[in-house]
Image: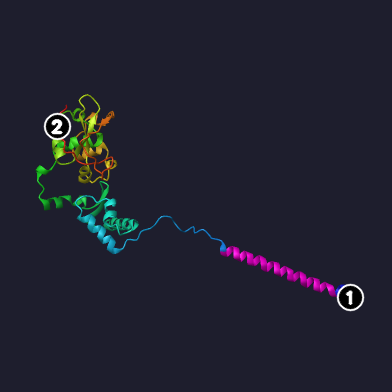
Amino acid sequence: MENGDTAAPDATADAVAEAETVADTVAGTAADTAANTVVPDTTSSDTVVGRASAELTAIVEALIFASPDPITPRMLFKLLADEPKEDVTAAVEALMADYEQRAGLQFVEVAGGYQIVTRPELHEWVRRLFHERSTQKLTVPGLETLAVISYKQPITTAEISEIRGVNTSGVLSTLMERHLIKIVGRKNVVGRPFLYATTKEFLVRFGLKDLGDLPKIEDMADALGFDPPVAFFDEMPRDKMLPLGDLDPDPESDSNVGSDSAAKPDAEG
C-alpha cells in the first residue's frame, strides 16, 4: 500500500502535465488558424466612389456653361481624360445638387447631355433681354405639325395632312429650316415618300431628355392651344422603312435623334 500511495500522486501529476500540453497545442493551432484565415470584408463594395474636388467641379461647370450644345458625359470624359471617370461623374452630381439651390439657373439633362439654363419661370424676363421678335416664333400650324411628328414619327407628309386635315408641305419646310425635324428614310409603299422625325435640336428647344419625356398628347395640345383631331389618337401602322443612302448617320445620336438632313421635303399629299 505504501508503494501504491506514493505512485498515485506521480500518475496524477503526469496526467495533468499531459493535459496541459494537449491544451497548449490546441490553443496554438487555433491561434495559427485564426491568424491565417482571411475574413471577408462585408463592408467593401465593388463600386468605385469618385471624389469631386472643388477645382474639378469648377472645370466641369465651366465646360457645361460654355458649351453651346448639351455636353454629353462622353465629351466630358474625353476633355478630362486625365481625370478618373468616377471623379468627373461625382463632379456632375455635385453640380446637380448645388444648382437645386440656385434661384435663377438650373442644371438640366437634355438631349443626352447637360446644360446650365435659366429657370422657366424667368423666361419672360430673359426674353426681354434678347428682344425676341414674333417672326422667330412658330405659328400655330407649325406647332400642330411639330406635335403630330413628335408623337407619330416616323411619318409621311400625307399622313400628317390626313391627321391635321390640311396640306402641310410649307410648314414642313419651315420646321426643317429651323432644324426641328429631319428626313430619316422612305416609307416602303408606292412612291416611296419621305419619312420625317424630330431632331436633337427639337429635344434641346423643348427641354426634353429624350422622346420618353414627351407629355401626354392632351397636355401638349392644351399647352399649344389647339384641339387635337381624333386621328391624332389612332395608332398608325408601322410599315417597313427604307433608309436614305445619301443621309449619313450622326455618330453622337441615338435611336431618337440624329443628324439634320439637307434634303428638302417631298410634295406627296
Q: Quick check: 191 above or below 2?
A: above
- Can residue 104 be spotted in the picture? no
Q: Which span of residues is magenta-colored?
A: 6-35
Residue in front for this viewpoint, 76 or 157: 76
* First in sequence: mark 2 vs mark 1: 1
Q: Secondary structure at mark 2?
A: helix
Image quadrant in which the N terminus is located:
bottom right
In which quadrant of the rendered view does residue 104 lie? bottom left
Q: Is residue 31 magenta?
A: yes
Instruction: Say what amino acid the circle numbered 1 marks.
Output: Glu
Q: Position of residue 80 (x, y in %)?
A: 28, 57
Name the amino acid type tagged 2.
Ser
Q: Which residue is mark 2?
A: 169
Q: How is the image coloured?
A: rainbow
Picture coordinates of residue 118, whole percent (x, y): 20, 53
* Residue in front for this viewpoint, 145 or 252: 252
